[in-house]
Image: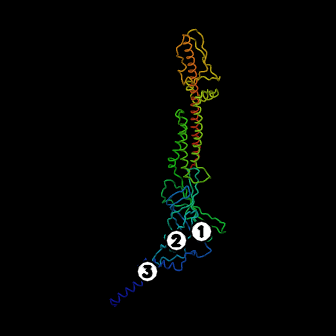
Amino acid sequence: MLSTTGLRKMKIWTIFLVFIAFPGFCFPADIERQLVQSLMVNYDVDVRPVENTSVPIVVKLGMALNQIIDVDEVNQIIVSSVWFRLRWNDFKLRWNSSSYGGLSSIRISSGRIWRPDLTLYTDVKESASTFTHYNAIVSADGSISWNFPAIVRSTCSLNVRYFPYDEQRCPLKFGSWTFDGLQLDLKNLSMSGDSSTYVTNGEWELKDIPVVRNELYYNCCPEPYPDVTFTIIIRRQSLFYLFNLVLPCALIVAITILVFYLPPESGEKVSLSVTVLLALTVFLQIVAQTMPAQSEVVPLIGEYFGAAIALLSVSTALTVIVLNLHFRGSHNNEVPYWMRKVVLEYMAKLLFMTETVKRNVSSPKKEETRVYPSHIPHLANGKKTPHYPNTSVRDLRKEPLAILDLEPQNDTNSLLLSISKTLDKFEVYLEEKEVQEQCETDWQLVARVVDRFLLVVFSLITLIVSVTIFSNRPTYD
C-alpha cells in the first residue's frame, strides 16, 4: 500500500496533468489571453484577411440613427448622432472553441485587427474620425462585429421651395476610399436604417431611412466602387414657423387692408402704410436669414411676403391718390361730370352707398359757371342795386366788417343805399361759401367711395393671393 506521502504526491501530479489538458477549467482569463496572443502571431493589420487574394472581402454596413442634433439650413449641413454596425469575416481570427475551454467569442481592440477603410463621402469635418478605441467582437468562426457610435456632420442639399412645409432628403454615402469593388465588396446590412432608438427632434420629424447599394465608376479608375447610401428623410414641423412668421405676416396684411378704412381726416393713412411696409420688410429679412442663400427656388413663405409687400406698396400709392381727391375741393374745383357718373352713381350703387351719396352730394352741373344773385330790392325807392364784382370773397373773409360804411350819412337814401350794397356783398359771400363747402363735400364723398371700393378690391386680392400661394403646399402621405 502507498503511504500517505505517496498518495499526496499522486494527487498533485493528477491535478497538474488536468490543468495542462483542460486549461479552461480553472483560469478562463488566462485562456482568453493565450487565445489573443496566438491569434495575433504574424497578424498584419494592413493585409486583407482573405484566403484567396483574387476574391473580395465582403463587408456589410448597417446604421442606427440615434438623434438629429442640428440642421444648419444656411450652410446646408446636417449633424446627427448615429451608431454604426459593421460585419465581415477574418479567416486569420478563427479558432476551435473546444480547445479553449468552450470560448466562442472575444473582444479585441479594433486597432489591432484589419478594418475596412469606410469613409463618409459627404463628410464636412475638418479632421478624420478615429474609432480605434472601440472594441470589436470576434467569434470563433472568424466573423467580426464592430459597433461604435459617431457624430456625423454631412452635407445636405436643402430644397426650401415649400418652406415651412418642406420635406428634406439627406443622403449619407459610405464607401471604401482605397479598395475597389474587386477587393472590398460593400453591402448593406438591412434594407433600411434602424430608428428604434431615435430621440425625437422638436423641429424635424423622421419619416424613413431607406438604404441603397450603388456601384459607380469614376474617371480615375476602371474598377467599380460600391457604396451604401443611407437617406435620412425628415419633414419640418411647421407649427413654430406658422406661429412666429406666417401668423404675424397675415395680421400685418390685415392691417394693410384697414388703411383704406382709416378716414382721410385722421392724417395717418400714409404713415400707417409706411409703418406696415417696414414691419413686413423686417419679417422678410428674418426669413432670408433662416433660408440658405440660393437662387434655384423661391420659398413659399418668401412669395407670400413678396406679394404682401407688393400689395402694400400699391395700396400706399393709391392712398396718396385718395388723399388728393379728398382735399381737391379746397381749390373750389367742381367734380367732373364723368366722375360723378362713374363714382357717385355706378360705383356707389355697387358698394351700397347710394343713400349716403344722395344725402350729401349736390345736383350735377354741366356748366362751368354759376349765376349768383346780383341785386336786392331797394328799401326806399324800389330801385335795384347793381352787383359789385370788385369785392372778393378773400376780402370778406379777412375783414368782413370793413365793407360796412357806418360813417354818418347826409340823408336816409345814402344810408339805405350803403346797407343795400353791404347786404348784396354778404349774399355773394355766403353763396360762394356754400358752393365751396358743397365742392369740398362732393370731393370728400368721391374719396370716400373710392376708398371703400379699394378696401373691397384689396380684401379680395389679398384673400386670393393667400389662398393661391398656400394651396401650393405639397401633400404628404
Q: Residue at x 55, y 41 (%)?
A: 274
- The residue carrying mark 1 is 177
Measured in 3D between alpha carbons, the distance from the residue under mark 1 to the one under mark 3, in whole angstroms, is 44 Å
Position of residue 290 relative to residue 41, above or below, is above
Label 1 sits on what residue type? Trp
- The residue carrying mark 3 is 23
Q: Quadrant of residue 430?
A: top right
The reply to whether residue 136 is visible in this rendering is no
Mark positioned earlier in the residue sequence (1 or 3): 3
Measured in 3D between alpha carbons, the distance from the residue under mark 2 to the one under mark 3, in whole angstroms, is 25 Å
| Mark 1, secondary structure of its residue | loop
| Percent position of residue 186, x then y | 58, 67
| Percent position of residue 44, x then y | 55, 77
Assess disc 3: are there few (<14), some (14-19) or many (≥20) residues with their C-alpha within 10 Å of its C-alpha: some
Measured in 3D between alpha carbons, the distance from the residue under mark 1 to the one under mark 2, in whole angstroms, is 21 Å
* Mark 2 or 3, closer to the camera: 2
- The residue carrying mark 2 is 144
Q: Quadrant of residue 428?
A: top right
Q: Quadrant of residue 368?
A: top right
Q: How many marks?
A: 3
In this view, the residue in front, 236 or 272, is: 272
Assess disc 2: are there few (<14), some (14-19) or many (≥20) residues with their C-alpha within 10 Å of its C-alpha: many
Is there CB contact under 8 Å for labels 1 and 3? no
